[in-house]
Image: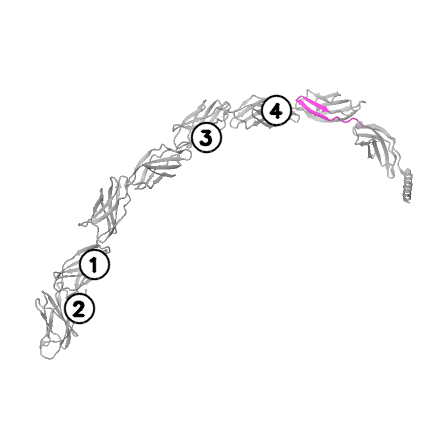
């Protein structure tokens, strides 16, 4: 059952194919006829045929038994490409129209020509070209021709069975065209191949070399050669090689090495290759800078510069330039030079080698710094007991100064960049050996600097005591260990400055004002200077005696003594003394009331001013007489209608008196004659109450007012003579003055 459908399908296909063949046979175009088939190029065959009416194109087929290649063309002739060289092909053709294509024509055989040889060309020399190739299939010979590419000149042609040929006697640096083809046994030539080749250039001539010693550069020039594209210059030594390339006729080779002998060669180049190098004369460069330069300063002030010998060096020049711009040099065939040097300079040293080529390159520039100069104008600015300030002028080359003071085992040092130093913590009255060393970081200290001796100022004296003698002179005593010193003692206070001097250990000072505080110091002085002052000792002078002492009678038994305040005094003691006795008071005020005074007695007045520390000034004054005693038994008597007699009993001693009556109708006064003890007042109104006071009059004329007062009533009736009625008394006293 399964095989029946397949058989039916096969029958249907066969029926359709037959039907198609019948239709095609009725409409296909005519079969063309090939006239000829031939090959001119190794990969193609050209076919010629008679055209067929109605055909729009043709299908060419080439078959070699292994491959079939078809090509559609429009008209005759047509070419089948993509074929193999030297191969026999069966060629057929079909015509094609809109209704189909014809059957294949009768075949015709045609063979492709030989392939073109693949050329390798080169120019082994400026006048020759070498042509070579691989063997070509089916070839039995080859033909090669050479001619200028520009078509001018002759043509060189050679036939050979070999696979290489050399053409000589050509022009150097010229472009040539090379053509070659192979032929087969029938003498039919195959494809040809074409190559262009330029002959290599000739070597340059007239080579000249110029050497720049400063830049270590060689400039090479030459005459240009025909056909050269560029040139290469090579400078070769035993250890190095330098080169340069250019399209010009000169070239510079830089970075040559000093102390070398170079071989210079120049070659010309083009696309064919390079010419053989043409050597110029050898080039000797400048010598290298001398090495292993050694600099020594021995003795100071002399520089010795030495160096190693160098290749190609004929002689040497050493240059020494100081940092102030001054330069000296020496010229020698040896390897050492000597120069004078100064302290504190930096010298820049360079050594050059010379030969016919010129000066060697600059080698290392060495610098050598000599020891800094020593200060030579050292002078002390300030010398004290424990300190010395010294200065000096700056010296060349010194970056730091080291000052050292030595006294026995004591060493004091200071370092500073300034030209000054303060040496402190020194021993007083001591001789020091002082040296100032200059220092630079490069060279260190200059240890040849000279020393100076400086003695410190004397030690401060110590005041032991201060005393006062009977003549009010101040004696100051001190202690000191200085040798040959003069001492000055100074007492200074608000009221001035007082001094005394001595070469011993004591001196006297007088004339100090009273009531003052002084600070007493002592200073020692030698040629080295003054010592620091001693510790001050306070000195207090006795208080000043007050001025303007006055004594005023307050009452008959009390005297008020007053005075002005004396400087520094804190308290006072006032003393009144007579043959009868003494009256005294101690007060901090400027007055004092002294009692128990006997009237009419001469007293000696004394005053003592005492300071807060207990210093006492005894002040003596003139004597003082106490006032006369107040009179006793004062009575009034009538002297007629308008008169009053005042009567009293005189006290001890001679005295003058004054009487005063005070009433509502006035004050009435009278003074008795000397030696009398009564006084009369006339024209006094009666009928009034009067206060009566009889007062002693002091020698100064001052009326004392401390005596008692009495009151009397004076009536207008009764006898015109008799005692006035006593009404009472008052004991008013004057206030102290």
Residue 232, percent across and down?
60, 26
Vertical placement of residue 31 versus 571, above or below = above
Labels 2 & 1 near each other (Cβ < 8 A): no
Q: Secondary structure at mark 3?
A: strand
Q: Furthest-front residue in view?
A: 409
> Earlier along the polypeptide chain: callout 2 or callout 4?
4
Q: Is residue 103 above or below residue 284?
A: below
Whichever of callouts 1 and 4 sits on the residue coming sooner in the sequence is 4
Q: Is residue 581 magenta?
A: no
* In the depicted structure, whether residue 483 falls above or below residue 635: above
Looking at marks 3 and 1 on the same chain, the residue that comes earlier in the sequence is marked by: 3
Which of disc 3 and disc 4 is earlier in sequence? 4
Residue 62, which numbered label? Answer: none
Q: Earlier in the sequence, mark 2 or mark 3?
A: 3
Q: Which residue is mark 3?
A: 366
Residue bearing the label numbered 1: 572
């Amino acid at each position: 059952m399964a095989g029946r459908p397949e058989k039916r399908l096969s029958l249907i296909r066969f029926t359709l194919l037959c039907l198609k063949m019948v239709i095609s046979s009725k409409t296909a175009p005519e079969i063309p006829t090939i006239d000829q088939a031939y090959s001119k190029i190794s990969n193609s065959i050209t076919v010629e045929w008679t055209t067929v009416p109605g055909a729009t194109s043709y299908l060419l087929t080439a078959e070699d038994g292994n491959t079939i290649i078809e090509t559609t063309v429009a008209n005759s002739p047509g070419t089948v490409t993509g074929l193999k060289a030297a191969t026999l092909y069966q060629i057929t053709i079909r015509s094609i129209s809109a209704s189909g294509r014809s059957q294949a024509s009768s075949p015709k055989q045609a063979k492709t020509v030989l392939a073109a040889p693949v050329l390798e060309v080169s120019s082994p020399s400026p006048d020759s070209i070498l042509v070579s190739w691989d063997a070509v299939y089916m070839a039995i010979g080859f033909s090669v021709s050479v001619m200028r590419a520009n078509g001018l000149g002759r043509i060189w042609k050679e036939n050979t069975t070999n696979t290489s040929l050399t053409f000589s006697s050509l022009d150097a640096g010229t472009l040539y065209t090379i053509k070659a083809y192979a032929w087969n046994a029938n003498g039919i030539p195959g494809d040809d191949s074409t190559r262009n080749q330029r002959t290599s250039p000739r070597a340059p001539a007239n080579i000249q070399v110029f050497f720049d010693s400063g830049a270590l550069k060689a400039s090479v020039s030459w005459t240009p050669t025909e056909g050269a594209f560029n040139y290469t210059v090579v400078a070769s030594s035993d250890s190095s090689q330098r080169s340069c390339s250019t399209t010009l006729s000169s070239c510079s080779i830089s970075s040559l090495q000093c102390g070398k002998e170079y071989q210079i060669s120049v070659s010309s180049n083009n696309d064919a290759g390079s010419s053989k190098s043409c050597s110029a004369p050898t080039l000797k460069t400048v010598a290298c800078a001398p090495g292993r330069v050694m600099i020594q300063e021995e003795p100071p002030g002399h520089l010795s510069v030495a160096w190693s010998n160098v290749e190609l060096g004929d002689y040497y020049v050493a240059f020494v330039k100081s940092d102030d711009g001054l330069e000296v040099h020496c010229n020698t065939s040896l390897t050492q030079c000597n120069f004078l040097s100064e302290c504190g300079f930096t010298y820049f040293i360079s050594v050059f080698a010379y030969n016919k080529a010129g000066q060697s390159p600059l080698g290392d520039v060495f610098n050598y710094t000599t020891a800094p100069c020593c200060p030579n104008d050292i002078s002390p600015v300030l010398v004290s007991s424990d300190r010395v300030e010294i200065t000096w002028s700056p010296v060349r080359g010194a970056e730091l100064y080291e000052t050292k003071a030595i006294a026995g085992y004591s060493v004091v040092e200071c370092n500073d960049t300034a030209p000054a130093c303060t040496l402190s913590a020194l021993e007083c009255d001591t001789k020091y050996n002082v040296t100032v060393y200059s220092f630079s970081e490069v060279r260190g200290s200059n240890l040849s600097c000279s020393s100076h001796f400086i003695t410190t100022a004397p030690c401060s004296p110590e005041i032991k005591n201060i005393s006062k003698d009977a003549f009010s002179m101040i004696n100051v005593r001190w202690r000191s260990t200085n040798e040959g010193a003069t001492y000055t003692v100074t007492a200074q206070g608000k009221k001035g400055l007082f001094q005394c001097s001595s070469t011993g250990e004591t001196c006297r000072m007088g004339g100090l004002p009273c009531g003052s505080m002084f600070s007493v110091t002592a200073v020692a002085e030698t040629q080295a200077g003054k010592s620091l002052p001693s510790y001050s000792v306070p000195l207090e002078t006795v208080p000043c005696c007050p001025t303007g002492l006055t004594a005023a009678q307050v009452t008959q038994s009390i005297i008020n003594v007053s005075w002005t305040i004396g400087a520094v005094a804190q308290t006072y003691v006032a003393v009144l003394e007579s043959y009868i006795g003494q009256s005294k008071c101690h007060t901090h005020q400027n007055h004092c009331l002294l009692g128990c005074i006997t009237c009419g007695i001469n007293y000696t007045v004394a005053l003592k001013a005492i300071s807060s520390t207990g210093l006492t000034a005894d002040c003596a004054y003139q004597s003082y007489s106490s006032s006369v005693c107040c009179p006793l038994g004062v009575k009034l008597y009538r002297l007629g209608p308008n008169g009053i007699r005042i009567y009293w009993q005189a006290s001890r001693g001679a005295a003058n008196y004054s009487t005063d009556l005070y009433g509502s109708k006035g004050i009435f006064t009278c003074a008795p004659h000397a030696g009398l003890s009564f006084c009369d007042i006339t024209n006094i109104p009666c009928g009034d109450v009067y206060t009566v006071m009889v007062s002693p009059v002091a020698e100064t004329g001052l009326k004392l007012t401390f005596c008692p007062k009495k009151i009397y009533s004076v009536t207008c009736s009764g006898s015109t003579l008799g005692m006035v009625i006593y009404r009472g008394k008052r004991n008013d006293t004057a206030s102290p003055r």
